[in-house]
Image: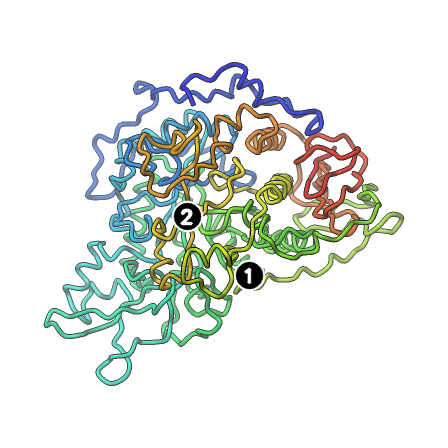
Amino acid sequence: MSDETPDDLNDDASGVDDQHATEADGVHEADGVIEADGVDEADGVIEAEGVDEADGFAAVATQLDPADDTWWRSAIFYQIYPRSFSDLDGDGIGDLAGVIDKLGYLELLGVDALWLSPIMRSPMADHGYDVSDPRDIDPLFGDLATFDELIAEAHDREIRVTMDLVPNHTSDQHQWFIDALAAGPGSPERARYIFRDGRGENGDEPPNNWVSIFGGPAWDRVTEADGKPGQWYLHIFAREQPDLNWENPEVFDDLEKTLRFWLDRGVDGFRIDVAHGMAKPADLPDMDVEAAGLLVNRDDDPRFNNYAVHDIHRKIRAVIDDYPGAANVGEIWVDDNERFAEYLRPDELHLGFNFRLAKAPFDADSIRDAIENSLDAVQSVGGTPTWTLSNHDVDREVTRYGAAVVTSDSETPDTDTVDSETPDSETPDAEAQDTETSAGETLDDETPDAETPDAETSVSETLDDETPDTETERAEQTPHVDVELGTARARAMALVEFALPGSIFIYNGAELGLPNADLPDDALQDPVWERSGHTERGRDASRVPLPWEGSEPPFGFSTNPQTWLPIPESWAEYTVEAELEDMNSTLSLYRTAIELRYERDEFAGDGIEWYGAPTGCLAFRRSEGHLVCALNTTSEPVGLPPGDLILTSAPLVDGMLAPNAAAWLV
């Protein structure tokens, strides 16, 4: 992509085919600049001079708008996986300068805030989630001056910046852990982590039977200064990620320094990694190992979701509240709605990631259950629902929805249209209500009970349980992915997601309709691959660098053809350059949907109301603005409810909603 955007490209990107929208030509050309011009040093850079790095504070900037303390309630966050977003220094790995270079694109897309996956100093055993210095930028991505420049430039474009925070554990290269190993048993240094004597004769057995989320045991034994085997330390993740002891007040005191260090630089908030972790039961009881799975946990798992974690979140919130305009969101893998809601009480997290929509198969009943559960989960505490279809830990939606699985989407729908009769009463709160079940029936006062997704099912679990020995066997055992079908369904689900009240999280590349990349074994870098003994391929397939321009790899991501993960040659059709020039592309659909979400009054209201719909379909409307969203998960066209069509994910078929498609009406 050139630095200067042709006028006709802007025109194409803002226009929408009449079959796709009737009132979507509202993308502002004046705002739609995608030039990656150089940073105006005079205007944009906040100098970091005078920062007392030893104290960990840098009072050089404020949040984007301290007067707006509710922006997060309806924000669209864009998750940037920095290694894979844009590489400006040519080493094949994305960096902060690359993010600055693409801020014009993000402004054009229309997002409110960025979420940066880890950029703190790290040995990269888990790609940044093993932090050795939480108050510095890893040289792989840049330095503090570049980060300050990013904050200033993003704020100039009215884009907030949030960043990953990893409080559950540190790197084994963190000075604290180095000191703990040197100090020995019973020392204050070891008290910062979870060290225990072993069980059995001579302490040769781990303190309990816990296993790592990445596979293998969750305990490693250290060699003491005298050369003899000694204590064991806990690592719920990789052995390079020792868990902190949150009963030790030193641990929070240090986290507070970290929070203030970044907030004083103008950061607008944090995404708290493993927000349901940190606190551990004092007696460290054994777990049900047979029920454990890689990258997943159950609600009764003693490694997570212990009540003491809420005291930690209250302390974090007290610090955040010192910075008006800042907010935090927690990664909460908790299925029980009551337990989930506890994290969103007014003195804890602002937002909590809810993964039900991402875990739901492309089936109308499952999708409705996921939506109802997500709304119910936050209602009791007046919380804000969050919606996401993918992130760096799960398969991309195109691959999930296109995998060869048997679901009810194969059913042929009734020939009825979606019932759109106006409900008799309105429900202003966030609870979803049944409006009608079929034509002519009265309002149903009871919403069907939603099934709780199986907590043991991994979103990324698309391969057979039996592990292949060779790449040929793997190819034979891998379920076929129909990319065209997966793309259609992913586009439809994007409209469902954007039609819902609350905050939206987009994983970089979702707006391009990227599928998972098929990577050779020797390219895999996720620690899951090694920790599982090459039985689980991990998450690399959804972390491949983004394609920006051109017809061959690395597609403008870098000047270095040897990118940290290889980019498929087949991704030429997915480049930002190509999709901006195609008004029917997934990128154009995202741009239009985001524009409409912000500009139209029909998106008002904190709740939704359900309408009767044919088998395999669903329809709801926003409680106040009365936007109607209809979804067809079947293989046949279905009639639309009355109303003015403003956007569809696919062209209509003889005036009806196409299979695997969604539509917005007003």
Q: Quadrant of residue 471?
A: bottom left
Residue 401 in percent (x, y) is at: 59, 49
Name the element at disc 2.
loop
Q: Nearer the viewer, residue 57 or 650?
A: 650
Residue type at numbered disc 1: Asp
Residue 485 visible in the displayed image: yes
Q: In the picture, which quadrant includes the N terminus?
A: top left
Q: Residue at x 48, y 38 (%)?
A: 509
Q: Residue at x 70, y 25 (%)?
A: 18
Q: Quadrant of residue 152?
A: top left
Q: Is residue 244 above or below residue 196?
A: above
Nearer the observer: mark 1 or 2; the answer is 2
Residue 398 in percent (x, y) is at: 56, 44
Q: Earlier in the sequence, mark 1 or mark 2?
A: 1
Q: Is residue 476 left or right of residue 59?
A: right
Which numbered disc covers residue 519?
2
Q: Quadrant of residue 17?
A: top right
Give the residue number, with chain letter if any, for mark 1.
335
Q: Is residue 345 left or right of residue 193?
A: right
Which numbered disc covers residue 264?
none
